[in-house]
Image (spheres, rainbow, N blue to C red):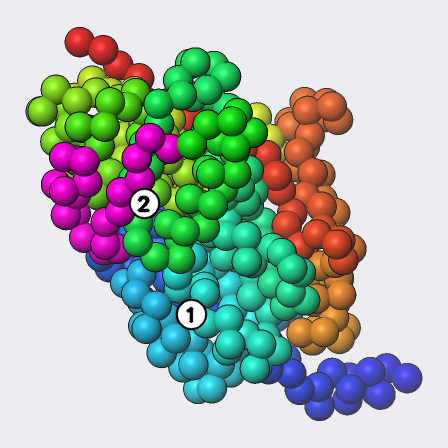
Amino acid sequence: MLLLSCITRISFAEHGITNNQITLGMSNALSGPASQLGIELRRGSTVYFDKLNRAGGIEGRKVKLISLDDGYEPVNTVINTRKLIEQENVFSLFGYVGTPTSFAIMPLIERNNIPYLMPFTGAEFLRSPINKNIFNLRASYYQEAQAQIDYLVHTLKIKNIGLLIQADEFGLAVEQGLLKAMKKYNIAPVVTTRYRRNTNDISGALAKLKNANIDAVSFVGTYEPMSEFINQAHQQDFKPVYTTVSFISSSDLFARIKYPSRILVTEVMPDPKHCQMNLCIEFLKDMKLAGFEQGNQIELEGYLNAHLFTQVAKLCIETLTRDCLIKKFESFSLPLEHYNLDALKSVRIDFSKKSHQGLSKVYHSFFESTP
C-alpha cells in the first residue's frame, strides 16, 4: 500500500505541479504610474512564500512565484498571461493588479480553465455572476464606493460631489458603484470628468471641476495623477474634500501631498501598524526579518493572499489539482483572530458556492490637515 501511494504521487501530473514545486504566475505593474502597487503586493506575497519555503513548503512542495511586468497596460497583461499559461505551465494565476488588465484576460481564463486568485481589484464583473475559476479576497468597489458616499453625505453633509474618473474599465467599475451609492441618497454627480490611464494630464479635468461649484471630488485612478490633481488644485485655491478607493495606496498617496488637504482613502485591509490581529503581528515580524522595517496595507494584502492560497492548497495536498483547489475554496472559512483571542473581534474569511469573495470589511484612512 505504501509503495502504491508513492508511485501514485510520483506519476501524478497536473499543470504547474511537480513532486517538489507548485508554480504560480503573476502579471502586474512593476513599472509606470501604478508600479508601487505591483511591487508592494508582490513583496508581501514573496515574504510569505519565502518563509513557507524555508519551512519546507506545502507538504514538501515549495511555491515558485513567476512575476512579470505589464506596466498596467492590458495588452501586456494578455501577452504575459499567455506566456505564463503556455510556456511556464503555471498551476494558477495569482495576485494580478487592475480592472482593465483583469478584463483583458477573461477569455484566457475561460479558455484554459485556470484559477484566477486574489486579483487586486474590486470590480463587480469578477464577482457577479459567479465564475467558478475566480476567487477574490478583498471587498468590492461597490462596498468601498458606498462607504465613501456615506462619509460625504451622511457624516459631512456634503451633496455637491464631482467625479474624476480614469477612462477605462476600472473607472467605469467604480463609477457605477458611486452612482449606485449616490442614488440611495437621491443625489447625482454635479459634474463627471475623465482622464487617460497611465498619464498625469489632469489640467482639463481640474478646470472643469473647479468651475462646477462642488464641495467634494470622488477620484478613480492611481496615486500619481491624484496627488498631481490635489497639489495643483490647492495652488489654484480649490480645496474640496477628496475620496478614492483602495487601488490607491494611502501611504503612497499621502507621501506625495504637499499641502493641507482633506482626503479619505477607503481600504480593504487594516493598517498593520495599528492592527491587533495575529496575522498582522506575524506580518510585521516577517517583513522586518526580510529587511523591511515598515509594512503597509498593500503588502499585507499580498501576504494574506499567499497565506490564503497556502491554507486552501493544504486541503488538497494528496491530489493537488485545479479542480480540487476550486472545490476547497468554495467551502473555505478562516477566522483572523486578534492576539487577545476575543472571538467578537475576529475577522472571518468566508467563501461559498454563492460567494467567491472572502472579505467584505472596508476601512478608512484619512489625510486631514489644515494650515
Q: Nearer the viewer, residue 4 or 77?
A: 77
Instruction: Judge left or right: residue 90 versus residue 19.
Output: left
Q: Most extreme residue toward the top, as rendered? A: 371
- Residue beneath label 2, please? 165
Inspect the magenta stretch and tell me whether residue 164 lies in it. Answer: no
- Residue beneath label 1, please? 104
**What stretch of residues is rendered in magenta?**
189-208
* Residue 24: x %, y % from top left: 51, 70
Q: Nearer the viewer, residue 148 or 256?
A: 148
Inspect the magenta stretch and tell me whether residue 202 lies in it. Answer: yes
For the point 47% across and 86% down, which residue is it?
A: 86
User: Disc 1 or 2, which lies upstream in sequence?
Assistant: 1
| Picture layout, residue 13 above or below residue 166 | below
Q: Nearer the viewer, residue 36 or 207?
A: 207
* Residue 111: x %, y % from top left: 56, 82
Residue type at the position of mark 1: Ala
Instruction: Judge left or right: residue 105 versus residue 15.
Output: left
* Residue 298 in sight in this render: no
In what quadrant of the picture does the C terminus appear?
top left
For the point 56% across and 71% down, which residue is it?
A: 92
Mark 1 Cα shell of 10 Å, populated few (<14), some (14-19), many (≥20):
some
Instruction: Judge left or right: residue 289 versus residue 232.
Output: right
| Picture layout, residue 82 above or below residue 214 | below
For the point 17% across and 22% down, which residue is it?
A: 238
* Residue 210: x %, y % from top left: 18, 28
Residue type at the position of mark 2: Ile
